[in-house]
């Protein structure tokens, strides 16, 4: 399909690359806001330890008792990963991969694509992994206790 838009001849893959680039810009803006929000709050003392997030979430998964500090940390981590802005991270990675693939296909002008063309698929699969990890951590909200007896 050949489109004449403002004097340029765009083809299908060029259009898709442009859409992927706009999606990348929007997702990157969301990532910037999300990271800025995370960095602006004061860290909890438990979060300074190495592997604290992993160990606390493992306790939540196994439904082991949590201290008040661990409960606050776990609820903060789970709330952060349930945020819609958290999903901007894999969206930006996926959009970047799409932009690379579609841009490479547009540059070929109908020639046979090589393996280099599909290198963008690697970050696309990686973004699916990040999304799965976010969803897995988001499901832990139902495992959190309502309150901790002190």
Image (spheres, rainbow, N blue to C red):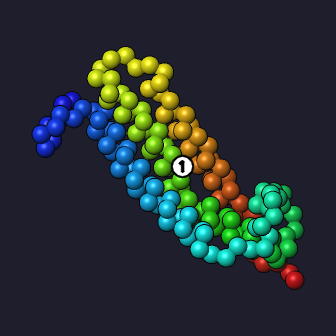
State the image coordinates of residue 51 (x, y, percent, origin top left): 80, 57
Q: At 24% across and 32% down in the image, what residue appears?
A: 11
Q: In this orientation, which residue lies closer to the viewer: 131 or 126?
A: 126
Residue 84 appears in the picture as rendered? no
Does 146 sit left or right of 122 as displayed? right
Q: In this orientation, which residue lies closer to the viewer: 105 or 145?
A: 105
Pick out the residue farthest to the top: 112
Q: Quadrant of the N terminus?
A: top left
Q: Quadrant of the C terminus?
A: bottom right
Q: At 60% across and 62% down in the image, what residue appears?
A: 82
Q: Residues within 10 Å of mark 1 (few under 14, many from 20)?
A: many
Q: Secondary structure at mark 1?
A: helix
Q: At 76% across and 60% down in the image, what residue appears?
A: 53
State the image coordinates of residue 34 (x, y, percent, origin top left): 53, 64
Q: At 65% across and 59% down in the image, what residue appears?
A: 138
Does 107 sit left or right of 48 as displayed? left
State the image coordinates of residue 129 (x, y, percent, origin top left): 62, 43
Pick out the residue farthest to the left: 7
Vertical order, 83 against 146 (above or below): above
User: Label 1 belongs to which residue?
Assistant: 90
Residue 129 appears in the picture as rendered? yes
State the image coordinates of residue 23 (x, y, percent, origin top left): 39, 50
Vertical order, 77 against 92 (above or below): below
């Amino acid at each position: 399909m050949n489109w004449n838009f403002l004097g340029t001849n765009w083809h299908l893959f060029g259009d898709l690359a442009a859409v992927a680039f706009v999606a990348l810009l929007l997702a990157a803006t969301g990532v910037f806001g999300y990271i800025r929000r995370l960095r602006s709050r004061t860290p909890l003392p438990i979060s300074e330890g190495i592997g604290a997030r992993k160990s606390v979430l493992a306790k939540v998964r196994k439904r082991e008792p949590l201290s008040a500090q661990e409960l606050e940390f776990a609820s903060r981590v789970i709330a952060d990963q349930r945020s819609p802005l958290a999903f901007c991270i894999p969206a930006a990675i996926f959009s970047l991969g799409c932009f690379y693939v579609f841009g490479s296909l547009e540059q070929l002008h109908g020639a046979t694509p090589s393996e280099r063309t599909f290198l963008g698929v690697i970050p696309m699969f990686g973004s699916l992994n990040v999304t799965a990890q976010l969803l897995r951590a988001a499901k832990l909200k139902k495992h959190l206790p309502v309150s901790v007896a002190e």
